[in-house]
């Protein structure tokens, strides 16, 4: 059983702008995920979805310190990463609805959202598949000297695959401008962390590649943002990679919203983590510190709701792909 | 022989239970195969029956999963290593084609590798490009490997047992869209050896060779054609390596026309090999060029409208047979 990290004693300083920015990123992710989860259940959206609800602070805290020129690679649980990197909800919904107006023209679906204009190099349905690609993106920045940084998001389970280890070592030995962000939600599908690795802190893996390993409370967006800022600045200075381990939790099942076929998680564990909900945490901080009022937070929820409805409406009214175009884009011509 | 109706996945599962009960050297490893019984329920109940020594969840580590199987098989055990989705063979490919496939020959016959790899392939679920592929031609191309693609509950049980009893590295590719397909399955343990085609329906006018789930679609097409007075001989090779060309060629010599159907892309697909074998062995019997129906040369698309156009179905098989018959 995993237990949530204790509420941080250390007070991460924050400005009003930072709190508002992180809050909006997280609420956009939360509402996108909850709505698309429902749409899959009702059969309006095909395929399967791996929802990011619970982990919003991680993508948001990291996304907040990146520019559109910085690159990220993502996973099967990638909607949050795309949104935190600035993706628009209209083409995201349209992609889930398999429409031509979607980010992949309906070709990729949930597990393959991409937005090159915002440095979102694509979600990935192969566990670990995105990690070496981020190393390549970081290499391109170093090669060109453009000051860009790459971030690769992946899960605890992905750190057991060879691609992670090969990538971490190569990035370290070449001082590549990359940040490895492992979102430790305690499970790889239905297998708990203690059943898939001996370590408790995945950050320890950094030492074997000669890079810093940092543990951060993945339910606290401010803390994630701080850690990400330091790692990103280090990478920009040419000092090489960092591995950030964010301790977090997914509130829904591995896939979809509905309950689990077998009870692989203790309900008490789920509740304990839910009580540390990242969005509620930042709202509490904002209000307690007098930075943002409760009404303002409510206003953000309302604005996001309008954006969600607009995105779904847009997706519903968009055209289906034409089977006559099925061979387009196999090659660059 | 008592039979009863079982689903494809239950039949497979029963085969696993019975062969593990029979042979204590058989063990199973893979991601979420134990506690969860596999994401497709393929391995339900095995942990409860055989315990953690023989049924193990692994970390996400496809290369090590297969490599462990190779090493354990070389020591005489009979590992079943699961790769969940067929697309993940990509991650484990070195162990599959440089190691498992070659050890027997490269070491001058010194070692056998009775490894079984299980996985699920096929499109039709909006699972997109990295979770929908049919890569049997890749695997069948490598000397030393054997590849089966069960197309019925009866075959799902018989082929997994045949694979595990085989002294070579075998890959059993279930089709994830067929999991709930029902059919008659004997209660007792039986094995279907690789390399024996199944003549699903006998006929005189045209031969259809179909692979994996396409057998189900071709059977529907054959029924429709039968009502129109066209008699189809439907052949399911069951394994694409080894391939039972004898049965296929004999059928073509009888019908003089043949259509090959698979859901993998047409270019370089197993249909190309079957077609070559036919023209080499039955050229003088052909009344029309060997026809193929398969996926276009593109990754599997997510959108249902595209995916439906991508994967052959009964209607398109029927149309292809009609075109073949019109050809003089
Ligand atoms: C190479 C590969 N192996 C297995 C899978 C099936 N799979 C999808 S998600 C997943 C678990 C991933 O766990 P983790 O990395 O912790 O990410 P999380 O789902 O917890 O976000 C597995 C095994 C896959 N997609 N790719
Ligand atoms: Mg995880």
Image (spheres, coloured by chain):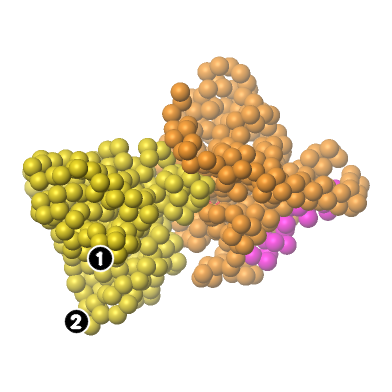
Where the N terminus of chain A falls, by quadrant? bottom right
Write the residue at 18% across / 68% down: B191
Residue B277: mark: none
Magenta residues, start to end:
A270-288
What is the number of the mark on residue B1? 2
Q: CA distance from mark 2 to mark 1?
A: 16 Å
The structure residue drawn at horizontal position 58% and vertical position 17%, both measured from the top left corner, is: A145
**Which chain gets the yellow colouring?**
B
Callout 2: SS: loop
Please state if B278 lies on the left or on the right of B151 as rendered. left
**Residue B86, percent across and down?**
36, 50
In which quarter of the view is residue A36 placed? bottom right
Picture quadrant where residue A34 is located: bottom right
Q: Chain of mark 2?
A: B
Q: Which is nearer the N-term, disc 2 or disc 1?
A: 2
- The residue located at (25%, 46%) in the rendering is B326
Judge whether residue A277 is colored magenta.
yes
Circle 2 residues within 10 Å: few <14, some 14–19, many ≥20: few
Local crowd size for mark 1, using a 10 Å CA cut-off: few (<14), some (14–19), many (≥20): many
Camera-side residue of B213 and A251 = B213
Q: Is residue B71 above or below residue A87?
A: below
Same subunit under labels 2 and 1?
Answer: yes
Chain corresponding to orange in the figure: A
């Amino acid at each position: 059983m995993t237990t949530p990290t204790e509420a941080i004693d250390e007070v991460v300083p924050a400005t009003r702008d930072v709190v508002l920015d992180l809050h909006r990123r997280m609420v956009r992710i939360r509402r996108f995920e909850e709505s698309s989860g429902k749409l899959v259940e009702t059969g309006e959206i095909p395929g399967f979805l791996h929802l990011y609800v619970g982990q919003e602070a991680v993508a948001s805290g990291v996304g907040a310190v990146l520019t559109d020129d910085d690159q990220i690679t993502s996973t099967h649980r990638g909607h949050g990463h795309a949104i935190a990197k600035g993706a628009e909800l209209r083409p995201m919904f349209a992609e889930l609805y398999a429409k031509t107006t979607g980010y992949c023209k309906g070709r990729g679906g949930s597990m393959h959202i991409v937005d090159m204009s915002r440095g979102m190099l694509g979600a990935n349905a192969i566990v670990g598949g995105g990690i070496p690609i981020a190393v390549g993106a970081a290499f391109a920045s170093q090669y060109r000297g453009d000051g860009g940084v790459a971030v690769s998001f992946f899960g605890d389970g992905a750190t057991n695959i060879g691609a992670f280890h090969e990538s971490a070592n190569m990035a370290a030995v070449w001082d590549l401008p990359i940040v490895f962000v492992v979102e430790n939600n305690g499970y790889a599908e239905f297998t708990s962390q203690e059943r898939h690795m001996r370590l408790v802190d995945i950050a320890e893996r950094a030492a074997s590649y000669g890079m810093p390993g940092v543990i951060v409370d993945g339910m606290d967006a401010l803390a994630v943002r701080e850690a990400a800022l330091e790692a990103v600045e280090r990478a920009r200075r040419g000092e090489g990679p960092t591995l950030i381990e964010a301790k977090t939790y997914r509130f829904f099942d591995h896939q979809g919203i509905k309950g689990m076929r077998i009870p692989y998680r203790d309900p008490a564990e789920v509740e304990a983590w839910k009580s540390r909900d990242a969005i509620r945490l930042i709202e509490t901080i904002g209000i307690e510190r007098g930075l943002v009022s409760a009404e303002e937070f409510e206003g953000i929820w309302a604005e996001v709701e309008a954006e969600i409805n607009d995105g779904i409406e847009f997706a519903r009214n968009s055209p289906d792909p034409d089977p006559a175009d099925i061979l387009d884009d196999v090659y660059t011509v | 022989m008592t039979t009863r109706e079982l689903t494809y996945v239950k039949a497979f599962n029963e085969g696993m239970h019975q062969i593990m009960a029979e042979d204590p050297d058989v063990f199973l490893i893979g991601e979420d195969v134990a506690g969860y019984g596999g994401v497709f329920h393929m391995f339900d109940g095995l942990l409860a029956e055989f315990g953690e020594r023989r049924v193990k969840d692994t970390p996400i580590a496809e290369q090590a999963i297969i490599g462990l199987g190779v090493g354990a098989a070389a020591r005489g055990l009979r590992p079943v290593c699961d790769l969940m989705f067929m697309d993940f063979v990509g991650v484990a490919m070195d162990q599959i084609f440089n190691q498992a496939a070659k050890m027997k020959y490269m070491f001058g016959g010194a070692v056998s590798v009775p490894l079984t790899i299980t996985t699920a392939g096929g499109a039709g679920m909006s699972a997109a490009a990295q979770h929908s592929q049919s890569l049997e031609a890749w695997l069948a191309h490598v000397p030393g490997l054997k590849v089966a693609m069960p197309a019925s509950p009866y075959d799902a049980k018989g082929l997994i047992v045949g694979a595990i009893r085989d002294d070579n590295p075998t890959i059993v590719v279930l089709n994830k869209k067929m999991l709930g397909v029902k059919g008659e399955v004997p209660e007792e343990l039986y094995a279907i050896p690789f390399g024996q085609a199944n003549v699903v329906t006998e006929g005189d006018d045209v031969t259809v060779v179909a692979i994996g789930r396409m057998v189900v679609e071709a059977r529907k097409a054959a029924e429709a054609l039968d009502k129109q007075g066209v008699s189809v001989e439907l052949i399911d090779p069951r394994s694409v390596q080894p391939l039972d060309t004898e049965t296929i060629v004999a059928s073509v010599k009888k019908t003089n026309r043949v259509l090959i159907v698979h859901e993998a892309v047409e270019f370089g697909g197993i249909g190309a090999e079957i077609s070559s074998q036919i023209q080499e062995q039955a050229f003088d019997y052909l009344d029309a060029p060997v026809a193929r129906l398969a996926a276009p040369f593109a990754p599997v698309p997510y959108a249902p409208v595209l995916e439906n156009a991508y994967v052959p179905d009964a209607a398109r098989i029927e149309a292809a047979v009609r075109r073949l018959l019109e050809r003089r």
